[in-house]
Image (cartoon, rainbow, N blue to C red):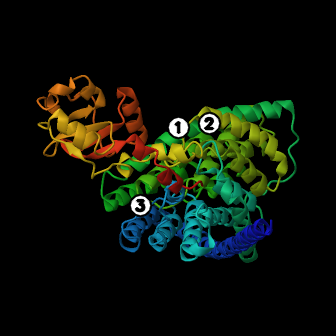
Amino acid sequence: MAGSLERWRQRWAIDRDRLALAGRRSQEVLLLAGVTGVLVGLAVAAFDELAAEHVFPWVLDLPLWATAAAPLVGLLLSAAALRWLAGGATPATTDEYIRSFHEQGRALDTRPAPGRLAASIATLGSGGSLGYEGPAIYAGSSIGAWLQQRLARVFRTEDPKVLLVAGAAAGVAAIFRAPVTGLVYALEVPYRDDLARRALLPAAVASAASYVTFAALIGTDPLFPVAGQPDLSLRDLLGAALVGLFAGGFARLFSVVIGRAKALQGLASPWVRALVAGVVLGGLFLAGWAMTDANLTLGAGYDTMRWATSADHGLLLIVAAATLRVAATATTVAGGGVGGLFVPLVVQGYLVGEAARVLVDPANATLFPVVGIAAYLGAGYNVALASVVFVAEVTGRPGFVVPGLIAAVVAQLVMGRRSLSPYQVDRRTGYLERRLAMGVAATVDTEARTVPPDATLDELFWQHLIGTRQRAAVVVDGNRYLGLVGVDELGAVEQEAWPQRTVAEVMRTDVPTISPSATVSDAAQAMAAHRVDRLAVTDGDAFVGVVTHEGIVRLDEILDATDR
């Protein structure tokens, strides 16, 4: 009895120490999330002050011809920064965050960060038609990832990307002066139908800290201040659903255009792409200026939104402005510009809503444009929650939440599975699902024993099946795969004939091979279809190794894949 009591006390002491350690680590993680938020707030404030408050206004004050030429200079400088400062990195910002979030066992590479941010200042400061939030997300996630890599001992193995998410949330919170939007967007954007909820509390702390830091330096005014509260009627709610329908359709088209623009990035050298895109952007700016005497295409698009609200413009002029903006954004992407697509979605949504206002209710100056933002943004990145919260925060009017939610849901239904980011996945996956989605190269046994075609069945039985406790063996001649032979083929031959019969006479040749680039799921399905427990992995005609059921479901490898 005394011995049992003593063992119980020892176990309690161990459990108590573990709980205390977990509590201290949780506090340290939240403290580091706060530090991340402050650092990101400072970085984004500096970035915004330089690009948005100094360089871009200076470009707009230049003579008209010089303003039109500025994007060309900016894209060339951006290409140079990516080439020599970022080590040949791609222009990706938000996509880089999403891609890194889903990569197992690899942290975000922060070495290209200074070069990418320099490229984004060149792009956006010179009038590239992208958003400031992309570089803010990338800067935030880079700072968070850098901190976590250097203080890895504080974090549990199941939280490998927690400061990556916290930093991204902090970046959005600062650039839009919207802490809840930053939190929700960073958690929502990696998935189409799920949330990265494991990072909720650290992301909330980082988002709040970043917002306070940025606001202390820049101010707290809403990004799009709107006067009054919407007086909603059934007609307005039905109109919001209609706006969502059109916004979802146009967002699908927008995603196709941007996808084609990204594909063009690999068709020519960065210098050629920057040169051609710069000339096109200059032409689009001059075309918009000729129509309206205003800047419709350069910059993130806030000038376009101010133009749209400055007077009652006809429907055709609004459609023309929206078309020019899409062309300018796609051209900037194709030219290798570094920036985000969040704000271009906001601008397009505003213009779609403004067109709906002209058609449906000309007297309602704010409802439809704001609802259009929620719908278009929610559809573009499949972030319905973030889009609605964004509208409420940046307008300072929570009354837009209900119509915005209606429009965002309708738009996302129309958008379907499309997204502006190719790295989004539908939802979080479990251990086995992630295991099956891995490449077969992760489980291939390159040292697996094989049997030559001229071996006798007697040798097969004693040396390759019984001797290795296997049900089947792969038949290989030199480095060339021939077939598969196992106990079923062996059992079809009388035992007395085993010393005289060869493996080549009875082996199966109908079992397919699988390439190293296939997934584990492909291998499992092929084994099930042919009722075998192993497959040969071949690269062309060359034998590489064997993948087996045992290799796929090996417990220690499954448990290595930690939940996000």
Q: Earlier in the sequence, mark 3 or mark 2?
A: 3
Q: Which of 508/277 is in front?
A: 508
Q: Residues within 10 Å of mark 3 (few under 14, many from 20)?
A: some
Q: Which residue is mark 1?
A: 253
Quadrant into which the N terminus falls: bottom right
**Side of 442 where 224 appears, left or right:** right
The image's mark for residue 248 is: 2
Residue holding disc 3: 90
Q: Position of residue 112 (x, y in %)?
A: 44, 70
Rendered view: 185 above or below 312: below
Q: Is residue 397 above or below residue 271?
A: above
Q: CA distance from mark 3 to mark 2?
A: 29 Å
Q: What is the secondary structure assignment of the residue under circle 3? A: loop
Considering only order in the chain, which callout, 1 or 2, is on the residue closer to the N terminus?
2
Question: Of helix, strand and loop, which one carries label 1?
Answer: helix
Amino acid type at circle 1 is: Leu
CA gap, disc 3 and disc 1: 24 Å
Position of 511 with respect to 30 (left or right) is left
Identified by mark 2, the residue type is: Gly
Q: Residue at x 49, y 56 (%)?
A: 103
**Horizontal arrangement in the rendering, residue 90 relative to residue 302 (left or right):** left
Q: Position of residue 34 (x, y in %)?
A: 71, 73
Q: Residue furthest front?
A: 1
Label whose residue precedes the other's in the sequence (3 or 1): 3
Q: Position of residue 111 (x, y in %)?
A: 45, 72
